[in-house]
Amino acid sequence: MVASAEKNESVSVDEKASTFDEETFPVLPDSLQFPAGLSDRAWRLGGIYEQYSRQVSPEGYDMYHEACWIGLLSILSLRRIKIPFSAPDYTPLMTVLMAEPGAFAKTATTKAVSMVMNSLGLDWLLQSGHYTPQKLLYDMSGRVPKDYIEMDELGQERVKRRLAFAGQRGMVIGEFGEFVKEIMDKTGSMSAYLGLFLEMDDCKSVYDGGTIGRSDEVIEKPQLSLIGCMTPANVRRLAAKDSELWGNGFWSRILVVCSPPGEYKDEPFGLGEVPIPNELVNGLRSWHRRLGIPHVEIDPIYETDKKGQKVLSSRVTASVTSLPEVSVTFGDGVYDAWKRYRSFIKRSGVQVLTIKDLRGNYERLPVRAVRIAALLASIENNDCIELWHWAKAQEIIERMRRSLHELYAQCNVNPALLTQSLEDILLDTLKLFQAEQKAPTAREMQQRTRKLKGVKSKDIAESFRQLERSGTIAITRTGKTDRYSLATEEKKESTAKDDDDYSFDGAM
């Protein structure tokens, strides 16, 4: 099935494409949901960004645009937004877009983030996935380049801007799946990122770079936010059931937006460059300035030569004022609404959730939600979280919770079942045995085709029972073993006649 370019809409290439089992998803009760339209008040600039992002990336999955807006705000917050819990929290987020190759424009959608940051003159805050953790920590520790004295005025000004936010960075990683594979290579140069991500997300006041072999790199008020892209194939092994990354807290710190399998968009790029709306740029620039920018002074050091005369050395001294922090406040009913949502998520994770690997994610979801609410309130409402900000944050985090289950399902199901139903696979396999005049067992069928490897025996048995009831196949029991074969035409006609005997047209 090919999508029509004229319709410009998402289509499904196979209506049988599977998603996660709805029974494994704890549903948000009606008592925690908000009236339709309440959250619209929290999305004025977000709506402008979404419209721009959709023009830049018309084939982006719908949820990608809102996720990138939240990721952009997190990067630009630069640890200046404080959430006044008893243990203060801040607003780092790690958001990853996931889809099958070619289905939705993941990388193109993230380009809108980079272009907006460039328009603000803050693109230098973004690091790629090619930076080693050692290089990243070196830059975040606030070192003045050795050739600072030789730089022209423009170059020195760039250094000062970087020093003002030395310990705060964002990352946009187009191949996040490959990046994670490098992280998991314990002998590789990127392996230290694993501990770095875990610690940075915990919002500690100081990060000691000595934990990865450099004792002289201390980062004050660190924050690392991230936007990435990956495919199910990239991370199928890394996100498989009981994998290490579920157990060590890595995946639980990632917010994922995962498109359903078998869907795509067919909407080509338009002609002409898309201008960034002035209202968007001005709103973000005003917000950045209001949150506060540290002042940086870099002074040369003079030394005394052998003649006792003062001469300019190559060394300098740098002083940076403290990073500003703006504390958000909670409007009427917001804190209670957050507590109720937190209780639902906590109870669901402990008592309802059947997928144990996801319990760590559930534990952190309420904090991720309040971070999103704080970002929305800070840019749109002078740092006061009202119910409409919380309603929007809850909507977004609930969509991401569903995406989390989608990711887990796609990484823990036979990929063949995403494009072909189990019953069709079983029938195709039986045809192979029929040509050899054999009636196989389920195990023999699994050994015959790779498409059935990893499929649960009970699912195969249930599918065969359904096919037997419809008269499509026959089951022959030999001792304790079931053997399967395609039904004869006589059997199919008999089953059809039995169905007709029980049908009626409503007349008595």
Image (cartoon, rainbow, N blue to C red):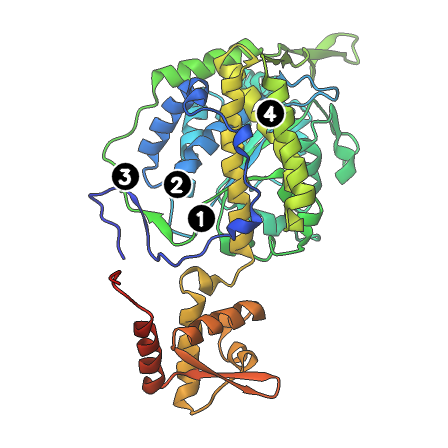
Q: Element at badge 1?
A: loop
Ranked by sequence position, the earlier of labels 2 and 3 is 2
Camera-near label (3 vs 1) is 1
Are circles 2 and 1 on residues that touch, CB within 8 Å? yes
Placement of 327 over or under 361, stated as above or below: above
Kindly identify the amino acid type of the residue bearing the numbered disc 2. Answer: Tyr
Q: Amino acid at mark 4?
A: Val
Q: Is residue 441 above or below residue 261?
A: below
Residue type, numbered disc 1: Ala
Q: Secondary structure at mark 3?
A: loop
Determine the CA span between mark 4 and mark 2.
24 Å
Camera-side mark, 1 or 4: 4
Whichever of callouts 3 and 1 sits on the residue coming sooner in the sequence is 1
Residue 99 is labelled as 1
Residue 326, given in percent of the width and then of the height, sits at 62, 12
Distance in Å between CA atoms under marks 3 and 1: 19 Å
What distance separates the C-alpha of mark 2 from that of mark 1? 9 Å
Q: x%, y% of residue 320?
A: 67, 13
Numbered badge on residue 370: 4
Instruction: State which tag comes first along the sequence, 4 or 2.
Output: 2
Q: Is residue 230 above or below residue 71?
A: below
What residue is drawn where x is 48% and y is 62%?
415
Front position in the image: 198 or 458: 458
Q: Residue at x 61, y 34 (%)?
A: 365
Q: Residues within 10 Å of mark 4 (few under 14, many from 20)?
A: many
Residue 87 position within the rendered picture, expressed as x and y whole percent measured from the top left:
74, 22
The answer to whether residue 463 is left or right of residue 264 is right
Q: What is the quadrant of residue 221 in the picture? A: top right
Viewer-nearest of discs 2 and 3: 2
The residue at the far top in this view is 309
Q: Amino acid at mark 3?
A: Phe
Q: Which residue is mark 3?
A: 269
